[in-house]
């Protein structure tokens, strides 16, 4: 079923979360067993991130370095099938523009359709680590709005080449990313919102936000979307802080602020265990306020680790 249908039918805030595919060489079954406790809270859907290729350098005798392209977390499609089989939840694979030609995107969507996936989150992706800025593939998409258009075209039975036996219409519900504190490349929030609107106009049915730690930023963001005339669901993304290093790394990586009240508590922490407790308490406080405001779903960034999210959900749902 489509995410938007789950939201329409629910008379309460839903629980959902995001996982990462395991690192290559690690067991999927172990990872699934790790997130199993979260099924107690009946998530209708679980997002699965996509990780594009990275470059590693192999040293050969004589010192010669060979640059090798590798995917450290492959298997997004396989995990979607595993989630459906094992937990009977809707998997939401993330699809990127980065690293994909339009042809590869079309084929990936056909694979997803064949295994019964009905929802996808359409994203541009970040720059390749060896490049300073995002560069689209030759014959790939430069922006998420273009990817949304391609998916919606397939929903209309329009494929890339006229030679394709046309007619079969996919039926994907498409979500897109939103940034309450603006995307880091956008010069202003208004500018970024203009391109969020482009994604909605291209056919996106719902938005999932980047993590935020100050609910007011989410409320203001949703207000701006509503004022622009769009009433689609805006699902808040929440991340329980779990380690001392995240105090520096989250703002640096995701271009967001940690509120003063949260920082006062975090600065008292001497260990990861103490940070984890503060992170859980803060997320419970955020979650309860968001539920009160009637948000469609609380979407947790779990990093495939259930412990903090379980404790939060136990208090909130
Ligand atoms: P876009 O919507 O294309 O926007 C990118 C930038 O370009 C923005 O600054 C926007 O304002 C601007 N822009 C958009 N359209 C135009 C235009 N036509 N002309 C000029 N400027 C324009 N990354 C991964 O690699 N894998 C994942 O699984 C993943 N999951 C994510 C899930 C969520 C909920 C979120 C919020 C992010 C996720 N990301 C993931 C990160 C995401 O790929 C990056 O933030 C990326 O830099 C932007 O992706 P986007 O889809 O928001 O891009």
Image (cartoon, rainbow, N blue to C red):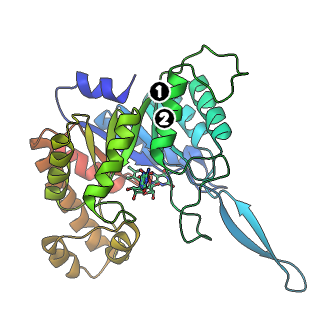
Q: Residue at x 34, y 77 (%)?
A: 248
Would you say 115 lies left or right of 202 here? right
Can residue 179 be seen here? no
Farthest residue toward the top? 167
**44, 200: nearer the viewer:** 200
Farthest residue toward the bottom? 62
Would you say 77 lies left or right of 10 here? right
Q: What residue would you read off at disc 2?
A: 149
Residue 260: quarter of image: bottom left
Q: Position of residue 185 (x, y in %)?
A: 40, 65
Helix, strand or loop for disc 1: loop
**262, 107: nearer the viewer:** 107
Q: What residue would you read off at disc 1?
A: 172
Helix, strand or loop for disc 2: helix
Q: Considering the image in quadrants, where does the C terminus appear?
A: top left
Q: Residue at x 53, y 34 (%)?
A: 150
**252, 181: nearer the viewer:** 181
**Earlier residue among tags 1 and 2:** 2
Mark 2 and ligand 1: say if the CB distance to the nearest ligand atom is below 8 Å.
no
- Mark 2 residue crowding within 10 angstroms, few (<14) / some (14–19) / many (20+): some
């Amino acid at each position: 079923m489509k995410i938007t249908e789950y939201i329409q039918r629910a008379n309460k805030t839903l629980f959902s979360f995001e996982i990462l595919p395991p690192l290559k060489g690690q067991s999927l079954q172990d990872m699934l067993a790790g997130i199993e406790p979260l099924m107690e809270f009946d998530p209708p859907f679980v997002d699965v991130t996509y990780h594009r290729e990275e470059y590693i350098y192999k040293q050969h005798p004589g010192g010669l370095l060979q640059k090798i392209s590798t995917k450290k977390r492959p298997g997004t499609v396989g995990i979607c099938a595993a989630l459906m089989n094992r937990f009977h939840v809707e998997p939401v694979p993330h699809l990127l523009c980065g690293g994909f030609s339009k042809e590869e995107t079309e084929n990936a969507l056909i694979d997803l359709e064949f295994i019964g996936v009905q929802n996808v989150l359409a994203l541009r992706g970040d720059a390749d680590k060896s490049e300073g800025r995002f560069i689209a593939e030759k014959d790939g998409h430069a922006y998420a709005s273009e990817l949304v258009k391609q998916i919606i075209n397939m929903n209309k039975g329009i494929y890339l080449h006229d030679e394709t036996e046309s007619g079969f219409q996919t039926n994907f519900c498409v979500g897109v990313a939103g940034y309450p504190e603006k995307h880091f490349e956008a010069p202003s929030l208004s500018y970024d919102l203009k391109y969020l609107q482009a994604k909605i106009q291209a056919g996106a049915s719902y938005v999932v936000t980047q993590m935020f730690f100050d609910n007011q930023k989410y409320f203001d963001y949703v207000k701006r979307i509503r004022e622009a005339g769009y009433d689609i669901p805006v699902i808040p993304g929440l991340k329980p802080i779990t380690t001392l290093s995240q105090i520096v790394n989250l703002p640096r990586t995701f271009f967001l602020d940690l509120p003063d009240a949260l920082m006062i508590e975090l600065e008292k922490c001497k260990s990861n265990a103490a940070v984890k407790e503060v992170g859980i308490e803060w997320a419970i406080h955020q979650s309860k306020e968001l539920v009160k405001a009637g948000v469609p779903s609380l979407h947790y960034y779990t990093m495939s680790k259930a412990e903090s999210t379980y404790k939060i959900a136990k208090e909130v749902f």
